[in-house]
Amino acid sequence: MVRGIYTGASGMTAKMHEMDIISNNLANVGTEGFKKDTACFKAFPEMLISRIDDNGVIKLPIGSIDTRPITGTLGTGVEVNEVFTEFSQAPLKRTDNSFDLSIDGRGFFSVLTDRGERYTRNGTFILNKENHVVTKEGWNLMGTNGPVRVEGNFAVNEKGEIYSNGEFQNTLKIIDFENNRYIKKEGNSFYRSTDLSGKAAQLSPSDFSVKQGFLEASNINPVREMVEMIKVQRSYEASQKSIHTHSDALHKLVNEMTRIV
């Protein structure tokens, strides 16, 4: 019975974690370039149950053998195995702002922060006093020839090539990873590489298409997330009810069966 309480508690803890993830997804429905997070779960190792009233231990010179009959298995709960990001393409929204950029296809924009280069799908940029194209936080958008700097009218073609007043200036540094499933979110729509994701590498123009005057929306489906939230709430309540059931049974065992004895 006590083991059942722990199993139910592990289910409640896992569903609380999943609820936090869904809530964060819903909070970022309107965040440009945001990618949905999904939780994966795994069960704790199951244990074999055998009849304990049978003396099935045979001693041998090299050790012993347990021959008690196995009557089944017992689950020991669940835990969060992984939280991964789904990088599916989201719809592009037309803004007609020349500083709004989006990537159709693979890849991330490279941005130079005080922690080094970070990567984002959020293409909302502005122009600072030094004519550098920067994020709203002031971090430089990077090109293959360093920070992107423009003067006067500028245009970005589908290959990421930047022209200012008709002259070539730079090429956007569009990168990707060997396994982008393992890159980590850092907030403000930024990602960083990890040992499992591999280092950032420049993409070939055939792998993406840059759209100027467009922004990529989030890939969150709010209706689907609300349905998932209801499912998680029901599952949480089921685990909570199982704890109450085991607690009531344990209460009867301790307080009523002892009276009979």
Image (spheres, grey):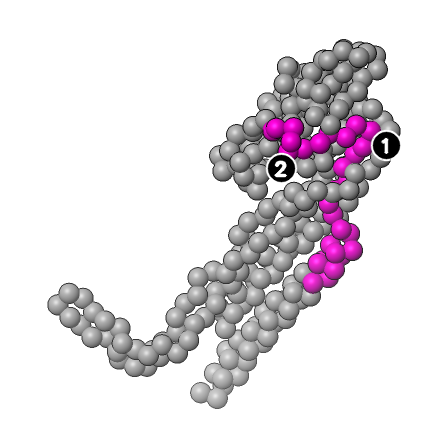
Marked residue nearer the N-terminal end (1 or 2): 1
Tell me: 60 left or right of 179: left
In the displayed structure, would residue 221 be above or below residue 1? above
Q: Position of residue 205 (x, y in %)?
A: 65, 28
Q: Is residue 214 magenta?
A: yes
Dot 2 amino acid type: Lys
Secondary structure of the residue carrying tag 2 is strand
Q: Say which residue label 1 marks.
A: 95
Question: Considering depth in this image, is 260 or 227 the residue closer to the camera?
Answer: 227
Question: Considering depth in this image, is 186 or 16 the residue closer to the camera?
Answer: 186
User: Residue 209, which numbered label?
Assistant: none
Q: Residue furthest left?
A: 61
Q: Position of residue 24 (x, y in %)?
A: 71, 46
Tell me: 19 left or right of 254: right
Secondary structure of the residue carrying tag 1 is loop
Residue range of the region highlighted in magenta in the rendering: 203-231
Q: Quadrant of residue 129?
A: top right
